[in-house]
Image: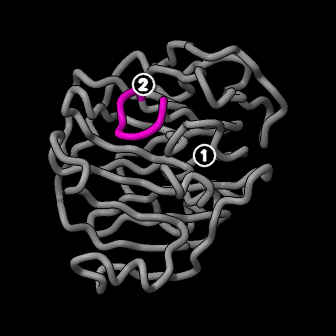
Amino acid sequence: FNGNLEDMSPFSNYGIDYTSHKYVQGKRGLALDFNGTSDYIELNKSFNSGYGLSFSFWLYTRGAKESENNGAIVSKYSMSNDTRCFMVYSFGSYDSRGDNRLSGAFYRYGTSSGIHDNVKSYMEAPEVLLFPSPQKWSLIDPKRLVPNVWTHCVINVTTTAIEAWINGELCVRKLRDWGFYFDTQTEPVLIGNNRSSGEGSNNHFNGMLDELRIYCRGLSKDEIRTLFLE
């Protein structure tokens, strides 16, 4: 996001720009400011998320705007096309729009939103007890996202678990139910939106993003701490 949408990795997966091109001072260099109602980016190439992906980014959230839901950071998901692959998001829906949790979900079947592995950075014990296997959840140091503050976020997918990290600290871990998730090369990867989910007028992120990295493997504690501190 240093003034453009170029991919700095060797894979040249550049962004197609559907934003208002508002670059601002970020955590490191420039960041891209998403207006929360229409801005989003589409990557020029999809990628395989069947085994899960890990995401690291700096986020400055302004919270939900109007009737927007979920505040999607990165998504490969369509309810209307039955191509639910994954979604990383920053707030909830309906009455939970203001809950400001870093969340990640990976879906086993493209046709179902309920059959998935997911994690949230903030959870309470009574919530965990509502799940079929509450023993799979570990509440380490639950934290909510704080609006209008730069926050380092990681959704970490290892071979056995999905984790939510905030500012270099592990918040919540959920052991995986599934070793493989639905994937399709026809559904594009979007940054800052999810064009077809179940609630609200859309699912735009409202705030700034910087230093987005996507990994096809799990990250170690030391790697996550380095990403936070570098």
Q: Secondary structure at mark 2?
A: loop
Spot occupied by residue 7 in the image (x, y as percentages of width and height): 54, 24
Residue 57 numbered mark, or none: 1
Task: Name the residue: 61% across, 26% down.
Answer: 37
Q: Is residue 230 above or below residue 132?
A: above
Residue 11 numbered mark, or none: 2
Q: Which one is in front, 220 or 202?
A: 202
Type of secondary structure dominating the magenta stretch:
loop
Spot occupied by residue 228 in the image (x, y as percentages of width and height): 67, 57
Q: Secondary structure at mark 1?
A: strand
Amino acid tagged 1:
Phe
Q: Which of the two discs, 2 and 1, labels the residue nearer the N terminus?
A: 2
Q: Which one is in front, 59 or 37?
A: 37
For label 2, the crowd category at 10 Å Cα-Cα, with few meaning under 14, some 14 to 19 and many 20 or more, is few
The answer to whether residue 55 is magenta is no
Q: Which one is in front, 61 or 154?
A: 61
**How many dots with numbers?**
2
For label 1, the crowd category at 10 Å Cα-Cα, with few meaning under 14, some 14 to 19 and many 20 or more, is some
Task: Name the residue: 62% across, 63% down.
Answer: 166
Q: Is residue 119 above or below residue 46?
A: below
* Residues in magenta, as a range: 195-201
Spot occupied by residue 6 in the image (x, y as percentages of width and height): 58, 19
Amino acid tagged 2:
Phe
Task: Name the residue: 23% across, 80% down.
Answer: 133
Q: Is residue 159 above or below residue 74?
A: below
Q: Is residue 1 above or below residue 224?
A: above
